[in-house]
Image: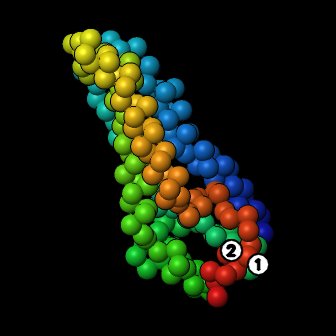
Amino acid sequence: MSKTFKAIRDRTYSGVGDLIKLLPTGTVFLFQFLNPVLTNNGHCLLINKYLTGVLIVICAFSCCFTCFTDSYRTRDGYVHYGVATVKGLWPDSSSVDLSSKRLRVGDFVHAFFSLIVFSVISLLDANTVNCFYPGFGSAGKIFLMVLPPVIGVISGAVFTVFPSRRHGIGNPSDHSEDDASEMK
């Protein structure tokens, strides 16, 4: 591979990584930015409902997928990215043992709670509610006010008690000794 190609590839990964580092915050921002446009500020036609549904599904997938990504540094300083599998990271580097970065139950727990948090944010958004559930009554408004903080506290507690050890795409470990110990 030429040095120019490697430099372009590394810059591309770095830029994408900087964006993904912000996820699911970036995903929620994208949803909050596009939702008023796609829902026509809550006054939906059939096409608006389909477009909003597609947006919700894509953003929900993004929130879950990022829980299964990881990155590591090799001894020569290069950062590699991958998706966790039962055997380690995919795609793997033949020079490094990545079995310590295999898929764990905690990854599914984090993905589940990320999905729940995003679902609450997206499905209880005022524009989404007006679009999909226009007859939501006063009891529903209380539900809209109470559920997000409750889900936030529960999810925050789970994420605090069981933190993820994944660094995600674009967010490699700053501690080279952590990665070096995993490469032995």
Going by the numbered disc 2, the residue's amino acid type is: Asp
Element marked by disc 1: loop
Q: Position of residue 140 (x, y in %)?
A: 27, 18
Question: Which image quadrant is residue 133 in?
Answer: top left
Element marked by disc 2: helix
Residue 144: in sight, yes or no? yes
Going by the numbered disc 1, the residue's amino acid type is: Asp
Q: Is 56 rendered above or below residue 115?
A: above
Closer to us: 109 or 31: 109
Residue at the spot 66% in from the left edge and 49% down from the top edge: 18
Q: Rate crowding at label 1 as few (under 14), some (14 to 19) or many (20 or more) other CA atoms within 10 Å.
A: few
Which residue in the structure is indicated by mark 1? 76
Q: Which mark is residue 92?
A: none
Q: Is residue 142 left or right of residue 26?
A: left
The quarter of the rendered structure image containing the C terminus is bottom right
Q: Position of residue 161 (x, y in %)?
A: 50, 56
Q: Is 31 rendered above or below residue 139?
A: below
Which residue in the structure is indicated by mark 2? 178
